[in-house]
């Protein structure tokens, strides 16, 4: 390899590094320049997403999640919480997406409360 090639590689590396670690005073580091995580739709993961036109304000409910001695039921609850929260765009109609037997008992009880926009927050020992 030539010295010219090494210099080009170094310049490319410096450019990538500068773009990855933006200076705090750089206009591109401003939050308005980048989308917030809350703007990412689950439509990229699912064939269709139910989205309400007028979502009710979210109510946050904590569910105890077992950290130790985890079995199949614990893993199924983790998965159900993740799926439930991923369907946040459906808001108060989220419960209509799931079959009754698909939801573990704690989440099924929340769904039985009716059309309420519930976000589940896992409560662990930590």
Image (spheres, helix red, strand yellow):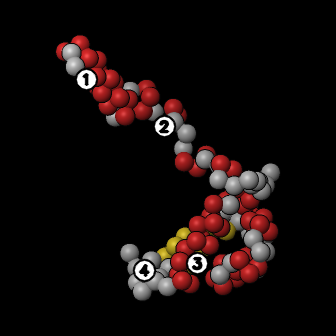
**As displayed, is residue 36 above or below residue 3?**
below
Q: Circle 2 — which element?
A: helix
Mark nearer the N terminus (2 vs 4): 2
Mark nearer the N terminus (3 vs 2): 2
Which mark, by number, is residue 30?
none
Q: How far apart are marks 2 and 4 (CA)?
A: 35 Å
Q: Name the residue under label 1.
A: 10
Q: Circle 1 — which element?
A: helix
The mark closer to the camera, 3 or 2, is: 3
Mark 2 in CB contact with mark 4 (< 8 angstroms): no
Q: How crowded is mark 4: few (under 14 residues within 10 Å), some or many (20 or more)?
A: few
Q: How crowded is mark 1: few (under 14 residues within 10 Å), some or many (20 or more)?
A: few
Q: Distance between the residues labelled 3 and 1?
A: 49 Å
Left or right: where does residue 59 sit relative to residue 114? left
Q: Name the residue under label 3.
A: 76
Mark 3 in CB contact with mark 4 (< 8 angstroms): no
Location of residue 2 in the rendering, given as x and y in whole percent from the top left corner: 21, 15
Mark nearer the N terminus (1 vs 4): 1
Q: Distance between the residues labelled 3 and 4?
A: 13 Å
- Quarter-of-image position of residue 11: top left
């Amino acid at each position: 390899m030539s010295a010219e090639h090494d210099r080009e590689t170094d310049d490319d590396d410096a450019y990538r590094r500068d773009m990855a670690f933006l200076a705090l005073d750089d206009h591109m580091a401003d939050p308005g320049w980048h989308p917030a995580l809350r703007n990412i739709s689950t439509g990229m993961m699912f064939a269709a997403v139910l989205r309400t036109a007028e979502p009710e304000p979210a109510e946050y409910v904590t569910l105890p999640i077992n950290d130790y001695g985890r079995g199949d039921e614990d893993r199924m609850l983790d998965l159900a919480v993740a799926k439930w929260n991923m369907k946040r765009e459906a808001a108060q109609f989220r419960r209509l997406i799931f079959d009754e037997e698909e939801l573990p008992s704690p989440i099924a009880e929340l769904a039985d409360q009716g059309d309420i926009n519930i976000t589940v927050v896992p409560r662990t020992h930590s």
